[in-house]
Image: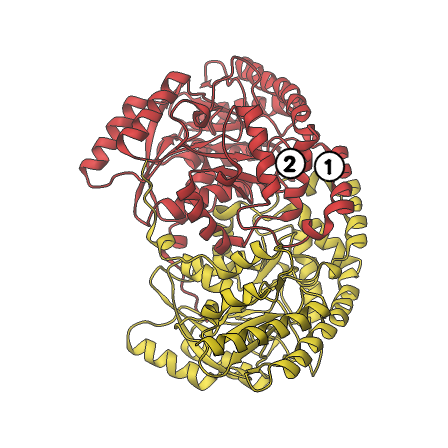
Chain colours: A yellow, B red
Amino acid sequence: MKFNFSDSVLGMKPSEIRELNKMASTPGLISLGGGMPSPETFPKKDLEDIMNYVMENYADLALQYGNTLGNDSAREVIADMLKKTEGIQAASKNIIINSGSQQGLYELATVLANPGDTIITEEPTYVGAVSAFSANQLRMEGVEMDQQGMIVEGLEGTIRKLMGDGRKPRFIYVIPTFQNPTGYTMPEERRKVLIEISETYNIPLVEDNPYGQLRYYGKNVDSIRSMKNGENTIYLGTFSKVMTPGLRLGYTIAPDEVMEKFNLIKQALDLATNSFSQYVAMEYVKRGVIYRQIEENKKIYKVKRDRMVSALREYMDGVARWSEPEGGMFVWATLNGNIDTRMMREQAMRNGVAYVSGQAFTTNNTQKSSMRLNFTFGSVEQIEEGIKRIRKTVDSYIEKH
Amino acid sequence: MKFNFSDSVLGMKPSEIRELNKMASTPGLISLGGGMPSPETFPKKDLEDIMNYVMENYADLALQYGNTLGNDSAREVIADMLKKTEGIQAASKNIIINSGSQQGLYELATVLANPGDTIITEEPTYVGAVSAFSANQLRMEGVEMDQQGMIVEGLEGTIRKLMGDGRKPRFIYVIPTFQNPTGYTMPEERRKVLIEISETYNIPLVEDNPYGQLRYYGKNVDSIRSMKNGENTIYLGTFSKVMTPGLRLGYTIAPDEVMEKFNLIKQALDLATNSFSQYVAMEYVKRGVIYRQIEENKKIYKVKRDRMVSALREYMDGVARWSEPEGGMFVWATLNGNIDTRMMREQAMRNGVAYVSGQAFTTNNTQKSSMRLNFTFGSVEQIEEGIKRIRKTVDSYIEKH
């Protein structure tokens, strides 16, 4: 048998992150590569209690097939939670519960665009989004960022240019708070402009907010969905960073007409999200464990973020510049002198440290000298040692080239 | 904001089953419609023990992101299980663990075919497959069945005709054992022919086997994947009918080159399947609970299957003919006299009984007088009363039309 494959899948490349996750267990390797939360933030005791409670009281429903859009009570609980944590006013009927927010990205790409259509992202952008959009054969047009996130003047220029070419973008995808991979946060003023542009050109705006709750410094910036005239924004959230990622729970908020289409595609994708996970998350929110855990996570990650920043200052001064994010999970570092971080990766691995090279996040083949550094997974000692090893790698790489 | 949607999702219709699941809680309504297992088959006590064990011993991994293709140990456990239950010899590297076998169907459609391509199914076929294939804009060519499943002479004719039209089918999809919706099982001889045809024309064969373990009568027929020269067959299995559907676990066996593509698409779809569910299933198999539970389920469902068949004989004699399946979850009944079961549905609902009309399962707009009747979910009393109500509905429908 000779198998023939679809064009979409032939165009996809294996992700560097997947490779890194596999190597995470290599003895001695310090991984600053993946995007994993630390197991010390998993509320194990609470989850064990909750699981027992769910099995004692809701087993027949928690083990059965569920509704396509999600358990109705869980959707209400999420709506309530979002009022508290994000000031988002959304009816439960406008919430779909997905198998992680990755599935939400895939659904969007399938529902809002045809193969060959163009969409707009930040440049660089989240590697999982690139994967979901590529699988649907979408063309990504990246708009440059500065430390305040996507440059909105650049966005408007890009839209006009694309429209002139008959390629009106089907949606605009942004991670406005503690962006992945850069860690940058978009201030309120730019968010307002983003809403205006979306409405003016009738291009749906997609706000992905997996890290918004994890702020260690500075003042909260309202999510776009919660702002004036923001109610048409499609909003993606997740339990992966405030509960656990292994239970695979994310959600999307969208207007009625989009929900109708989600209902169709979700049925085709996997019928419905894991019922048991939904019951666990529901109870996790109802008992208020989530709010306590968010505070706990912030304490743990703030220390790690500080250690990464201080290690960068100590070891990378003069060879790189980097973001010093107020929250989230990642620092974005760019090496001086045109060093290709993908070329340097093998040497780094041999020196016992892993990162994700900038090219994994690009829509236009740039970001060659950058790398994404995760500070949530490793211990503070590993973070410091990891940065040291990167410096060592840079030095020997420069020497050789 | 005016949202524009993709062509794929605009071409999809809401599923009758989804609607039925929503109504399952209507007081007094007997649903023979959905495809749900009975909660009395959920091994609650065992699962509760196992969940506690997983949380005590593997929490850090069971709550964390997992590998794209599935947990390596879980894949090995599934490979071992399939040797015992199906005589299937498959290496763990050829197994991907999915969020239910519905996701396996979606992956296949995305990976093996381009939008507009043609595939072959049984006529009628599983409604979830229709949904997954439609979402990928595949054209389904249904091959007629008799009580021995797909008519293989018809299959060869269809392939030649399609090839003559320049529409070589990208794969052949069959549910050879206790087919959904008909309950028919394909004998060994036809399976051999199917393998031959697949190899001769170089068209991948997909065997979906969610019900194979649930045999109440007759002699086991080997799965196609386990037969001589069957190793190129892509095989879909699930824990939904032998553990619980709410934990959303299915798996696909495929040759190496197909696995490579699954690895790409699975990452795009939802990164990886629920880790916790995988740990639970692994322990469920390792402890041997699954083998005991399969025997238990067979006892429970055999009684229900018998009651449905005897009720059909008692109440439907002369107004319909029906399958009397040796296993699985469904009876397929076809009314005499050209009655349109979709038209009759509303009346049936008013009489307090739900079924899925034949048209939900068709690839060519036939099956109008048929209905799928599920016998696993309701109690024996409900099954008997449900069939009575259908007879009552038929009588009053005939009178009016």
Task: Kindly identify the amino acid type of the residue bearing the numbered disc 1.
Answer: Leu
Residue B192 in picture, x, y percent from top left: 36, 21
In the image, what residue type sits under mark 2?
Thr
Confirm or deny contact between disc 2 and disc 1 (CB under 8 A): yes
Residue A157 visible in the shown view: yes
Write down the residue under mark 1: B47
Q: Which quadrant: the C terminus of chain A? A: bottom left
Task: Please report whichever mark, 2 or 1, sits nearer to the chain's N-terminal start.
Answer: 1
Identity of the residue drawn at 41% across and 82% down: A156
Q: Name the element at disc 1.
A: helix
Q: Which residue is mark 2?
A: B244
Using the image as rendered, state which of residue A79 and residue B393 is in the foreground: A79
Query: Which residue occupies the foreground of this view, B126 or A361?
Result: A361
Q: Which one is in front, B96 or B339?
A: B96
Q: Tell me how far mark 2 sits from mark 1, CA to CA.
A: 10 Å
In which chain is the residue bearing label 1?
A: B
Residues tagged by mark 2 and mark 1 found on one chain of the structure: yes
> Does A354 appear above or below B12?
below
Residue B23 visible at all: no
Measured as percent of width and height from the top left, residue A251 is found at: 60, 59
The subunit letter for the residue under badge 2 reads B
Dot label at residue B317: none
Graded by Cα atoms within 10 Å as few (under 14), some (14 to 19) or many (20 or more), the crowding at tag 1 reads many
SS of the residue under disc 2: loop
